Image: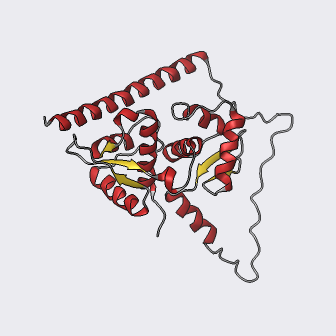
Amino acid sequence: MIGPDDVQIRVVGCLIEKQRTTPDQYPLTLNSLRLACNQSTNRDPVVDYDEATIRKALGDLGRRRWIRGASGHTSRSPKYRHLLDQELSLSEDQISVLSVLMLRGEQTPGQLKQRTERMFGFHDLDALQTTLDALASRDLIERLPRRPGQKEDRYRQLIGGNHLEETEADETRPVAPDPEGSSPADPEPVAPAPRGEAVEPLPVPQDTPETERIEGLERQVNELTRELAELRALVEDLREQLGA
C-alpha cells in the first residue's frame, strides 16, 4: 500500500490535536475537521481542502485502520476519531510530538517543546530529546542535517507525506555519466577584491523590541482567529444536534 499523502497526514494530525486540546469537541464532524485542516494558524503549509478531499482521505485512513467513525446518538452528522496511538503503540508524549510535526513540518526541539505545551508538558528539553530519540529509533521521525547558518537540529516525521516520495525519488534517480573523454568545465574565475578594500559580510537582521511587539500581536490575532473558527464549528455542530 502506498504511504499516506499530505492530506491524510493533515487529517490525522488534526484529529490528534483536537483530541488533546479541545476534548469537549472531539470526535470531529466532517465540517469541524475541514476547519481544523484549513486553519491559518499552527499549520505549515496553510491549505484549503474541500469536503470531498477530506472525505477521500478519511476513506483511505479507514482502510489503514488509522481512523474510525464515532457517530453519536444526539448528532445527525458522522464523527471521526483517530486510532494512530493504538496502531503504532504510541505514548502520550510521542503522539503529541508526532502531531505537531505532522501539522507544522520540520522543527527544532525548542519549537517542539513550545508547540506541544497544550498537548503534553515536557519538563525540559532533555525530556523532549528522550522522546525524539525514542521516535527516531522506530524510524517514525528523523533528525535532519544542519544547513549553513542553522544552529539547532531539526526533525521531521517519517509516517507519510509527499516529501518522503520526493526524497526517495532523489535518492534513486540515476546520475548521467560524463561523455567519454570529457572533463569538468573550468570554474569561472572570481574577481579578487580591490587591494586595500576589505570584503564585509552581509548584515544580519537583528530583532528589535518593535519587531517582537508586532510578532506578539500577530500571534494573538492568529490565536483569536483559530478560536473563532473552532467556536463556529461548535455552533454548527450544536445546530445539527438540535435539529436547527
Residue 45 falls left or right of residue 27: right
Q: Please determine whether, in this image, residue 61 is positioned above or below residue 132.
A: below
Image-based side of 103 in relation to 34, left or right: right
- Way the structure is coloured: secondary structure
Q: Where on the picture, by quarter, is residue 47?
A: top left
| Residue at x 66%, y 44% (from the top left corner) | 131
Q: Is residue 161 left or right of residue 171?
A: left
Q: Residue at x 36, y 57 (%)?
A: 57
Lateral position of residue 79 relative to residue 211, left or right:
left
Which residue is found at the position 48% from the left and 43% from the top? 44
Q: How many marks?
A: 0
Question: In the displayed image of the protein, which residue is found farthest to the right?
Answer: 196
Residue 49, given in percent of the width and then of the height, sits at 33, 49
Residue at the bottom extreme of this rendering: 180
Query: In x, y percent, where is residue 205?
Result: 65, 28
Q: Position of residue 140 (x, y in %)?
A: 60, 55
Which residue reaches farthest front? 73
Tell me the residue at 45%/52% (across/down): 83
| Nearer the observer, 93 or 200 | 93
Q: Quadrant of the C terminus?
A: top left
Seen from the viewer's position, the closer of residues 45 and 108 is: 108
